[in-house]
Image (cartoon, grey):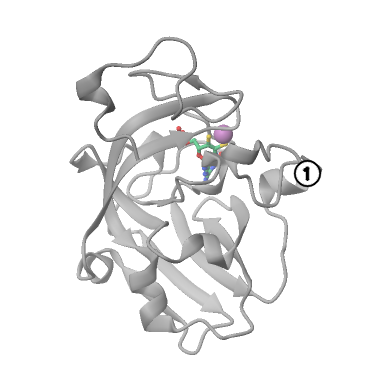
């Protein structure tokens, strides 16, 4: 992750931190929502992990905040071609939730769903190993409602549509099940470094 970029200055021309077909949005952080931003307070929020797990369970705001804090510093990439460098999110690693529910060996895929009904599918392997978070904070402040606050999924190594805002839960499955954008032609995995934008890429 290019955490030193802010100190060294950006290179003109091709930036090695920029996946193919992306541009640097600089300070801008565009809002992309298929839904109206919900009025969701921390008191209303909950997060559930179920499906192919040993012990399905839900966490409320306080319970989720009792888990170890974990931070992401790095870049994010939207399929509409903007990227942001060197952002900082605070939250809890999904590993901490999975340690409690214990995914079954048969679990290979996941569907993440929002309190609004938005869904997105991912390989389970993309949610483990310290690469995915339930994020509550951006740059040290509570996540803005339009960016998914009070809590969103964060899977920064994949295109940002996988990072479901207003995250409500993750269901583990033994097969892949297309989510909202994936049913509309977007890629099942969405790796920006391989430009997996649309199904067939
Ligand atoms: N619930 C929900 N989550 C969502 C979306 C959405 O429409 N609804 N859009 C996705 C897309 S396409 C992107 S690029 C990012 C946008 O996040 P931002 O609005 O914070 O930039 O959220 C993703 N998560
Ligand atoms: Mo996006």
Residue 110: image location, x then y, percent: 60, 66
Instruction: Please give the name of the residue rendered at 52% of the width and 66% of the height, measured from the top-left corner.
Output: 170
Q: Secondary structure at mark 1?
A: loop
- Number of marks in picture: 1
Residue density around tag 1, few if under 14, some if 14–19, many if 20 or more, within 10 Å: some
Q: Is residue 20 above or below residue 35?
A: above
In depth, the one of 88 and 20 nearer the eye is 20
Q: Farthest bottom residue?
A: 54
Q: Is residue 150 above or below residue 130?
A: above
Q: Would residue 90 be found to the left or right of residue 125 on screen?
A: left
Q: Would residue 199 be found to the left or right of residue 67 on screen?
A: right
Instruction: Please give the name of the residue rendered at 55% of the width and 40% of the height, measured from the top-left corner.
Output: 159
Q: Would residue 165 be found to the left or right of residue 198 on screen?
A: left
Instruction: Please give the name of the residue rendered at 22% of the width and 37% of the height, measured from the top-left corner.
Output: 139
Residue corresponding to mark 1? 199
Considering the image in quadrants, where does the C terminus appear?
A: top right
Q: Is residue 35 above or below residue 27?
A: below
Residue 149: image location, x then y, percent: 35, 44
Residue 78: image location, x then y, percent: 53, 32
Residue 60: image location, x then y, percent: 31, 68
Q: Farthest top residue?
A: 12
Question: Residue 107 occupies which quadrant of the picture?
Answer: bottom right
In depth, the one of 9 and 36 nearer the eye is 9
Considering the image in quadrants, where does the N terminus appear?
A: top left
């Amino acid at each position: 992750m290019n955490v030193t970029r802010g100190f060294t200055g950006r290179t003109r021309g091709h930036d090695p931190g920029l996946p193919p077909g992306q541009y640097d949005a600089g300070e801008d952080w565009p809002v992309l929502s298929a839904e109206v931003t919900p009025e969701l307070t921390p008191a209303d929020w909950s997060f559930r992990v179920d499906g192919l797990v040993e012990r399905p369970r839900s966490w409320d705001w306080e319970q989720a905040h009792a888990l170890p804090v974990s931070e992401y510093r790095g870049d994010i990439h939207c399929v509409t071609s903007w990227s942001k460098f060197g952002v900082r999110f605070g939250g809890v690693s999904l590993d901490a939730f999975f340690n409690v529910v214990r995914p079954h060996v048969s679990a290979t895929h996941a569907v993440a769903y929002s309190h609004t009904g938005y869904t997105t599918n991912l390989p389970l392997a993309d949610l483990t190993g310290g690469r995915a978070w339930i994020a509550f904070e951006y740059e040290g402040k509570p996540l803005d409602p339009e960016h998914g606050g009070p809590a969103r999924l964060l899977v920064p190594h994949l295109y940002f549509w996988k990072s479901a805002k207003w995250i409500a839960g993750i269901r583990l499955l033994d097969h892949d099940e297309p989510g909202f954008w994936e049913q509309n032609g977007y890629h099942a995995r969405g790796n920006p470094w391989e430009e997996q934008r649309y199904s067939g890429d």
